[in-house]
Every structure is written in structure tokens, then in C-alpha cells.
Amino acid sequence: MIGIPIAALVMGFLLVYFFLPAIPSQWADYVAIAIIAGLDAFVGAGRNWLERRFDEAIFISGFFVNMLLAALLAYFGDKLGVDLYLAVVVALGIRIFNNLGRTRALLVTARVEARRARGIAPSE
Amino acid sequence: MTGGKRWIIPMTFVCLVLGAMLGIQVHSQQLRGATEVGRQTSALVGMLSRNELQVEQQKQEIEKLRARLAEYEREAASEKGFARLMTEELATSRIALGTVAVRGPGVVLEISDSTMRTSNDFGGADVYVIHDFDLLQIANELWCAGAEAVSLNGQRLITGSAIACSARLIEVNKVTVASPFVFQAIGDKQKLMAALNIRDGVLDRLRVLQFPVKLTPKDEIVIPPISVTPKYDFAQPVKEKKQ
């Protein structure tokens, strides 16, 4: 099951990497920002999944809209001569770290609880 | 889990997009690195091979000159042959001197003052007009790319041609010219185009400031002769002593 999205990830990468010409270098920064936003949506989805409030509508819309907004913000920053690019990177970076930390905590808690449950179960 | 399969489709879709974007980014970053590191090396390799080619051409040239020298010596006896040779020499010299109109393939470059208008605080009007040094740089670029004959607004550029600024007017061969400036150059079309369009070159600089730039390759260009043949009051040919 989990294999299908992973295969899609690899396939998307390979298709573009080998068959598409490179984009103009001035776009590279915006694509990078969009990727960071996409990663943020991904990590957020992982956390929501563990907290059992994952919703694919929120995931999909968050993924695309945040990507677009992040790139647009960076673009306008460039046009205005303000490094909004940095604001986006910092904001998204903090969110990614927070969500990863939350995810780790959830996973560890789940393991500890499972071990405790196993420890108690045989004695009963 | 009830929603066990519902997440598969959006997740697959999102993964595809994310993978594609990573592909774009990695690809373009690699190319960026490759061009920056590789540029110097490839430039050096290019220079080396060009130099080798030049040496080869020079050798051939020497051979040709030697053969011609022998021919001169042989023809010197019969006056008719010698005259024919001199006529040929004269034709080449006239092209070099710019006293005859020439035709051939080449490029036409048209530039005029910038369409951008901003307040005088930002560099003033001087930034948005074509200067003599812009034209000099273009002319130089054309000669570098192997142009065999060049004219600017109908003025043939020859060895003694000056492009100079006097009292906010640009003079070529002592004739005043004004925007739009039209360069005509005869030579290898591809080479001339490439030399002018070189990244961060003179045309790039002008385009950034919104100077209208029109560069077109042409199969047939006619370049007029110089209007006033230069006089040589001071320079005298040095007579080589015969051994």
C-alpha cells in the first residue's frame, strides 16, 4: 500500500530528471521554496495521521496552496527588494521541526504505552 | 481502519508532484554547478584548441606566402603576369582600406535610446542614452568576432575611424550620427550574432536598461565605401633594403 506513493515519488523524480530540460536558473529559488512548502505539508500530514485527524482535503489543498503561496511570497519579495524568501524559509523550517518533534514524541509515547500494555498483559 | 484506502490516491498524486519538483531542482542545481565549475575548464580547453588551430592556419599562411613570393619572382620577368598579381593585391587592399563598397553575408544591429524613463535621481538621463563608448564596445566586439567590413549609420569603419563624443553628439569619421544607430557588419553570421549576444555582454547590458535592440542576420549586406579617403601626411612607407 505505502509502496504506491513511494513509487510515484521516485517515478516523478526520474521522469523529470531525465526527460525534461532544466528550468531557467532564476526560477530555481522559487521551486526550492515550493519544495520546502510541500515538505511542510507532508510532515504536517504525518503528524495529523498519528493524531488520527488526517483529512485528505486539508492535505491536498494545504500542499498545493502553500506551495503556490510560498513561491509567490518569495517572488513578491524579490520584486520589492525585500528578502521575504528568508521569512518563508524560517517560518516553514520552524514548522517542519515542530511537526517532526511532535511526530517523534507521539511515536515514542505509543511505543512506551504498547510496552507497558504488554508488560501488564501477561500478569493478568 | 475505514479510511484505509482513501488516502492512497491523494498521497500518490502529491508524491508524484513532489518527486517531479525535486527532480527539477536537483537537475537545475547540478547544471548550475556544472556550468560554474566547468566553464573555466572548457574555456581553457577551447582556447587551447583554438590556438592550435591558429598555429596550423599560420603555418599554411606561411606556405602560401612563400609560394606567392616564388610566383612574384617568376612573374617579375614577364610584366603582364606581374600586373595581374598587383591588381589582385590592390583589390584586397582596397577592401581593407574601405575605399570600395563591399557586399556579403552578415548582421544588422539596430539600437536606439532607452524607452525607460525614471526620475533624474536614478543616474539621470545619461543612463538612458547611447554613448560613444557603447558604440565603440559594439564595434570592437564585431571586429573581435571576425567582421571583415563594418559600417555605422552608413559610415564605413576603417582603421583610422574614430567614434567620439563631442558636445553630447556622437561623431563617426567626423560625421555626426544620432539614434537609432545601425551597425552593418559583413562576416560569419553565426559568429557575429554569438559575439554580440554573449551573456553579460554589451547588448545584455543595454537590454536590461530597456534599450530597444534589434539584431538580425542577413544573407546580403552592402556596405558603402568610406566617404573621405584618409590622407597620409606624416607616415611614410619604410623602404626595405634589398639584400
Image (cartoon, coloured by chain):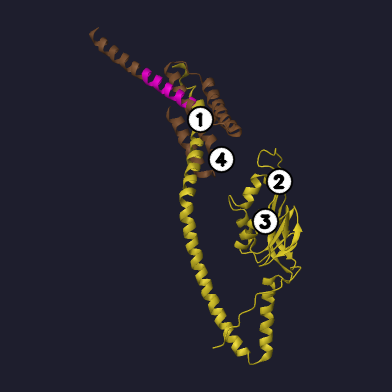
Q: CA distance from mark 1 to mark 2?
A: 34 Å
Q: Is residue A40 left or right of residue B121?
A: left
Q: Which residues are magenta?
A: A91-106
Judging by the rendered image, the residue that carries numbered circle 1 is A86
Judging by the rendered image, the residue that carries numbered circle 4 is A26
Q: How many marks?
A: 4
In terms of depth relative to the viewer, which is nearer, A102 or B211? B211
Residue positioned most to the left:
A123
Q: Residue at x 71, y 40 (%)?
A: B117
Secondary element at tag 3: helix
Q: CA distance from mark 4 to mark 3?
A: 30 Å
Looking at the picture, which amino acid does disc 1 mark? Leu
Sequence-wise first label, 3 or 2: 2
Q: CA distance from mark 2 to mark 4?
A: 24 Å
The chain holding disc 3 is B
Name the front one of labels 3 and 1. Answer: 3
Secondary element at tag 2: loop
Please check whether the numbered discs 4 and 3 fall on a single chain: no
Please check whether the numbered discs 2 and 4 fall on a single chain: no
Judging by the rendered image, the residue that carries numbered circle 3 is B135
The chain holding disc 4 is A
Residue B109 sits in quarter: bottom right
> Measured from the top left, where is residue B41 in percent x and y?
45, 55
Residue B88 sits in quarter: bottom right
Q: Colour of chain A?
A: brown
On whether residue B108 falls in the magenta region, the answer is no
Looking at the picture, which amino acid does disc 2 mark? Ser
> Measured from the top left, where is residue A1 in percent x and y?
43, 27
